[in-house]
Image (cartoon, rainbow, N blue to C red):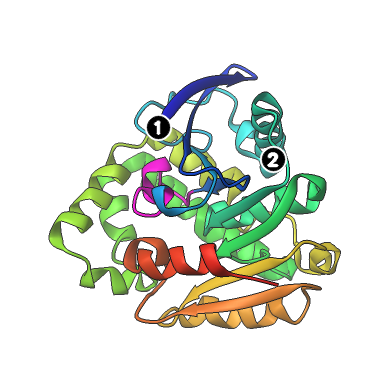
């Protein structure tokens, strides 16, 4: 895997690319909250063509504290991704985003549809579709921000106990420990600002804009993730060219819990 550092507005992104075969397909993979590019280690080498992944702003072992917290705003991060693609002269990409990375991928596809060939959203949403729900989420997210800055380790241990991740109890002890270590290695200040400035409570409501997505859009959801199954069903009703793929025996983090099934969907999905 090739590594390159791309500095944008004073922040250094660590970009990783890998050519798997001679296919012309180009993939860009965006991880979730408190994740890193390593989240996709189990699938990256199995995708056709060339694959790019990187640590999103403020995340990863090599991250530094982001001085300006407004850099975490989705619009700013969309601009950063555009700059990264321009640096590599990439276009017509297959864009996959997981959870928070899925919301970012959706925002990018809406802003730069000319750069996206196919959009893959894993366990993701179009945001919250009412101002009241967004206000409630901002309140709970701000409480989490306080927890992060007060006792980050306790926050991480509580985070992994959320019902959303209950199915990860089926992972091996080694896998669970790896995920915990990755989360604990993050910069607490960055984690807090990501939640405050990039959380669902402050995100633009993308639901009315889903009809603008002209590219094929694939929604991947775990069979055991009831919340995001419902969200996917509601999104499918609004997408002009959308398909839902439900992965059996998986919860929220599908590419970790059932990587082989995710690989098959990514490789074989057709329109």
In primary-sequence order, the first of circles 1 and 2 is: 1
Badge 2: few (under 14), some or many (20 or more) residues near its Cα, within 10 Å?
A: many
What residue is shown at x 38% (from left), y 49% (from top)? 39
Labelled pair 1, 2 in contact (Cβ < 8 Å): no
Looking at the image, residue 187 lies above or below residue 50: above
How many numbered dots are placed on residues in this image? 2
* SS majority, magenta: loop
Q: Distance between the residues labelled 1 and 2?
A: 24 Å
Horizontal and vertical percent for residue 76? 69, 35
What residue is shown at x 46% (from left), y 68% (from top)? 264
What residue is shown at x 54% (from left), y 81% (from top)? 229
Left-right relation of 248 to 236: left
The region drawn magenta spans 31-44
Badge 1: few (under 14), some or many (20 or more) residues near its Cα, within 10 Å?
A: few
The residue that disc 2 covers is 78
Answer whether residue 103 is visible to the viewer in this image. Answer: yes
Residue found farthest to the left = 173
The residue that disc 1 covers is 1
Q: Which mark is residue 190?
A: none
């Amino acid at each position: 895997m090739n590594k390159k550092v791309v500095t944008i507005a004073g922040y250094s992104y660590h970009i990783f690319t890998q050519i798997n075969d001679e296919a012309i397909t180009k993939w860009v993979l965006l991880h979730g909250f408190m994740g890193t590019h390593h989240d996709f280690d189990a699938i990256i080498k199995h995708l056709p063509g060339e694959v790019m992944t990187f640590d999103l702003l403020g995340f990863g072992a090599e991250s530094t504290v982001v001085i300006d917290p407004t850099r975490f705003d989705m619009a700013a991060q969309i601009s950063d991704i555009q700059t990264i693609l321009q640096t590599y002269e990439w276009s017509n990409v297959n864009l996959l985003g997981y959870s928070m990375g899925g919301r970012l991928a959706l925002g990018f596809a809406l802003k730069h549809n000319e750069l996206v060939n196919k959009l893959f959203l894993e366990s993701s949403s179009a945001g919250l579709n009412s101002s009241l729900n967004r206000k409630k989420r901002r309140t709970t997210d701000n409480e989490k921000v306080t927890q992060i800055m007060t006792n980050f380790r306790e926050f991480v241990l509580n985070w992994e106990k959320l019902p959303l991740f209950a199915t990860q109890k089926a992972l091996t002890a080694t896998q669970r420990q790896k995920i915990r270590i990755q989360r604990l290695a993050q910069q607490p200040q960055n984690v807090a600002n990501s939640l405050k400035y990039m959380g669902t409570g402050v995100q633009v409501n993308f639901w009315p804009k889903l009809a603008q997505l002209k590219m094929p859009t694939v929604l991947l959801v775990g069979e055991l993730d009831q919340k995001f199954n419902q969200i996917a069903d509601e999104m499918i009703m609004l997408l002009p060219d959308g398909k839902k793929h439900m992965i059996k025996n998986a919860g929220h983090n599908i590419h970790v819990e059932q990587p082989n099934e995710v690989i098959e969907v990514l490789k074989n999905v057709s329109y």
